[in-house]
Amino acid sequence: MTDKSQNPDLQDPGKLTQETVDHAQRLHEAETGADANWDTMARDDASRDESIEPATVIDGTPVGEGPAGRRPTNAELELESQRLEHTEVKRISYAGLIARRFFRQKSAVAGLTILAVLALLAIFGPMISPYDYTDPDFAALSVAPSAEHWFGTDSGGLDLFACVVHGLGRSLVIGISYALITTVLAAIIGTAIAYARGIWEKIGMWCLDMLLVIPSFLLVAMIVRATSGGTGWLMLIFGLSAFGWIGYARTLRTMALSLRERDYVKAAKYMGVSPFTIIVRHLIPNLGSILIIDTVLGVISGINSETAYSFLGLGIKVPDTSLGYILSQGSSAMLTAPWVVLIPSIVLIVLCVSMQLIGDGLRDAFDPYSRAAGNVEEEAEDATPGPEKLAEHDI
Amino acid sequence: MSSNTQNTEAALTVPVDDVLRYELLESNGPKNAPTGDPVMSVRDLNVSFNTEAGTVHAVRGVNFDLWGGRTLGIVGESGSGKSVTALSLIGLLDDNAHVKGSIKLRGTELIGLTDEEMSQYRGANISMIFQDPLSALTPMFSIGDQLAEALKIHDPEMSKADVRARCIELLELVGIPEAEDRLDSYPHEFSGGMRQRVVIAIAIANNPDIIIADEPTTALDVTIQAQILDLLKVAQKETGAAVVLITHDLGVVAGIADDIMVMYAGRAVERASVDTLFARPGQPYTMGLFAAVPKPHMPSNTRLVPIKGNPPSLAAIPPGCPFSPRCPIAGPECFKTEPHLEALDPAEGHLVSCLKMQQIRDQHLTYKEVYPDLEPLTPKWAEVPRDERPVVLELKDVTKVFEVQSKGLIRRTKGIVTAMDKVSFQIHEGETLALVGESGSGKSTTLMEIMDLAVPKEGTITVLGKDTRDLKSARERRELRRDLQVIFQDPMSSLDPRMPIYDVLAEPLRAQHWDKNKINRRIGELMGLVGINPDYVDRFPSQFSGGQRQRIAIARSLATNPKLLLLDEPIASLDVSIQAGIINLLEDLQTQLKISYLFVAHDLAVIRHISDTVAVMHLGKIVEYGETEEVFNNPQDPYTKALLSAIPIPDPPVERTRLRLVYKDGELVPANEVHV
């Protein structure tokens, strides 16, 4: 029952969406990730009532008269039956459908709420904070959280609240940029290699494998080390992204391998459509659901990498700060000022968990077999009186 | 008759209700009326699923009984509920299925049993033969192991030697030569037909009471299909089981079934003995099915009669008779009340669900009266004799070989596979050439060679007077592509699910750099041409039914006004009632636009209907090439003869009695003399 309150469309019996139950088709689409068959039409009772009217007209006139008194062609018959079927079709857009399935899951909504709160904190935190993350308060060194310093201060007298909100913003920006850049790179390069076939596919794969062998950790560390504190985070995004897409591109290539055999891709090729257009128009959009999920999860890995680099002193440096940097500073004062480690850790974990919940929710929303479709018992109770009787027949 | 019925009823130990009473009268088939107690009784079966679209009522109030030794054919299109019905008998439905009603196996109620309790009956009492033999066997275990598992799970006491002996016996029974040696083979070492034999062996391993065959031959070639159907009869004779045969192919049920139930939108709409149903179909939908199927054993001089429209969505079944929107004789009452099965002919137990039943019975309506006639088939290009029409496609001695390479660092060529062996044919303007063959015959390779405008190693491909060898620039190729388009088998995968129809149709035009206004006008034109409401341009492919999607695919291929269409099994994945519409559309388009078709198919009935000339391919060679009627009436090559004798014919007495020939090492052998 609880599901229904979140799903107004199911409450309204007039708004039924249409779906074919054909099992083979569902399987087919589930296998290929083409989740098209929920992308369905809704129709009104009103329009169905209307459909009765023209039908009686048919009954009156001799069957099989075409427009000009001759016998109808097949195309005309079909057009006539479409006029009879339903006059108006309302469409739930694919995005709308995914949103509906997403918001039906409590954990996903919780994740999104937490992320929103954290994002707001990162944006507006610096404004409400009485201190700046660069201004030490020498009157308060290593004080515990209090009304003055909400999260306490570290051994240098820096206000931890100011540092955490700034660091949170930094981590978020790095994580999101990293996820977006790697996804775009991986999608284009991965699908292009898959589509290329033959010698170009071999060369592409060889290049990918070579890139994977490069000791990227060291290279990123060197790139970031060479920069100044102010622009270090930009170089960190660059360094992380430059090596982050490779494994991912390999995965996407494998998925695109099955897409490239699809008839619509072949059809486009035979129509004379250019390879780049085919990649952008047919291959990448059909990987859409995977790309979206992996972008969200990519944010987590971006944040984690950033934290790790900064903790080791290879990432964000003073005067800038990030969650990882605060943690590395606080690790030495674990016993004397535990809040310096605990508070940023909690924020980091909450951030990652919220992204994970969103990622899970998205995956279920895109997966036609997940529980996001709602629950059959709740539906059936509506349809038939006496849930006890149902329970007894339920398999 | 009535005294006979009295006797049978007396022999029954189960209570006789209306359903059973009429079923006991179904005597117009090869095995006369059923006698004794039914093995299984299904009453008021309802199955619903919850989906994003709302509750889908897949099966609504279905009743039937099964008798040992008898075959019930359930006929229906995809989404009619026939497969869901079958799966609910064996308790293999999805977790979110909601089953109500009663399924009794020799008096034991099966609905409500847990999965564990149900598994005692599965295999032992009820077994299942699935559609796709390729995925029904586990690739990791030898077939001997898989057979043994089926035996041991229901009889753990069985000794190793007994199991082995029984396995060999079973494999011999299903016609697998050298059974003892093949026990240790793995599924990938078997062909599709052989695997289906193994699946059948597993199904009959425990002498079940009921064998459910869900489209057992749909994935197989026509000659293999004939063998598997024969084998099903053998399996039934051996086990004395009741067989439920689910199919969409009326030809298949004609030869094997005793009773037939036709399903539409989750309900049984007609039920009768096989001969009665084929001779006097009493429901407009059933009549439509017969009218829509091309007859393989007769020349086609009339057009097929399509059923307009599409089956309803099971999530939003309209009020009244679900067939009413498509029914030509539906009256206002048909849109309001849903009919139930009632006796059309009480003496024969012929049940029909139609509000117009009275009218059909009194006026003896057949499909000729019920369905509107279409324009008679206009003779194609009668004014110009064939030889004078230009040749649009010519293949001369085209040979294509695939090299099989060994694995390892140095890839040595191990051998060659000849996919095309000196293939030659030509197509004139406005003509249809059908390329027929079973899987592996090289027909798809031929199609792809033409589509790729490939330069063959041997022989020549000439498209619209241009030899592919002379095509130098990419531009020349692109221009030739405009006149050469392809339609694929599966409209599900030939339309990009993420693109609205407008973009789908605009794609070929954009590739040829048309301007926007011209594209707009052309799209409107195209949609009218194939019978899709032009207002639907903003919809996505998933919002259309299979038939409509194929129409859209046809519209797309017509966009650039091609002169030659290559059709790769264009109707094989469509429902029977939709097929006729697509065939008619293709014929209309040919007469309107003077296009030539190269029609690749395995369905010989369709080919006889649509094509002017036929080329039969076997192992990469064209073994027979000639005028369609000539090839069908007077086939010369033994392979063609075998192929023609294997087509199931939708006429029970004919199908049961005709002689089937099997092609074996270049010779013809009557099927009954081959080991199975």
Image (spheres, coloured by chain):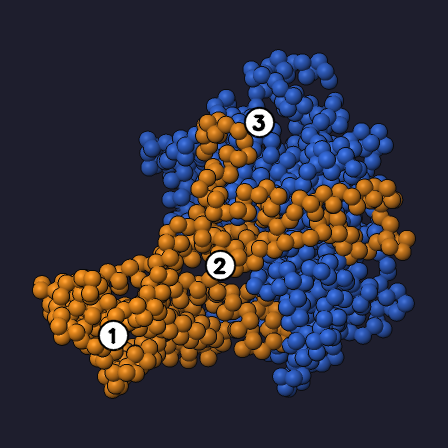
> How far across and how far down the image is residue B115, in percent?
41, 35
Residue type at mark 2 is Gly
Chain seen in blue: B
Q: Secondary structure at mark 2?
A: loop
Q: Quadrant of the C terminus of chain A?
A: top left
> How far across and how far down the image is residue B483, in percent?
72, 74
Give me the disc on residue B43.
3
* Side of B57 relative to B111 (left or right): right
Residue type at mark 1 is Asp
* Side of A346 relative to B589 (left or right): left
Q: Earlier in the sequence, mark 1 or mark 2?
A: 2
Looking at the image, can residue A143 be seen? yes
Contact, CB < 8 Å: mark 1 with mark 2?
no
Spatial separation of the CA atoms under disc 2 and disc 3 = 38 Å
Q: Secondary structure at mark 1?
A: loop
Question: Which of the 4 quarters of the picture holds residue B495?
Answer: bottom right
* Side of A253 relative to B670 (left or right): left
Q: Where is mark 2, residue-wise?
A: A33
Q: Secondary structure at mark 3?
A: strand
Q: Residue at 82% across / 44% down in the picture? A: A58
Spatial separation of the CA atoms under disc 3 and disc 1 = 77 Å
Asked if A323 appears above or below B367 in the picture, the reply is: below
> How far across and how far down the image is residue B511, in percent?
64, 77
The crowd level at tag 1 (other Cα within 10 Å; few <14, some 14-19, many 20+) is: some
Give me the disc on residue A132.
1
Asked if A234 appears above or below B644 in the picture, the reply is: below
Chain seen in orange: A
In front of the other: label 1 or label 2?
1
In front of the other: label 3 or label 1?
1
The crowd level at tag 2 (other Cα within 10 Å; few <14, some 14-19, many 20+) is: some
The crowd level at tag 3 (other Cα within 10 Å; few <14, some 14-19, many 20+) is: some
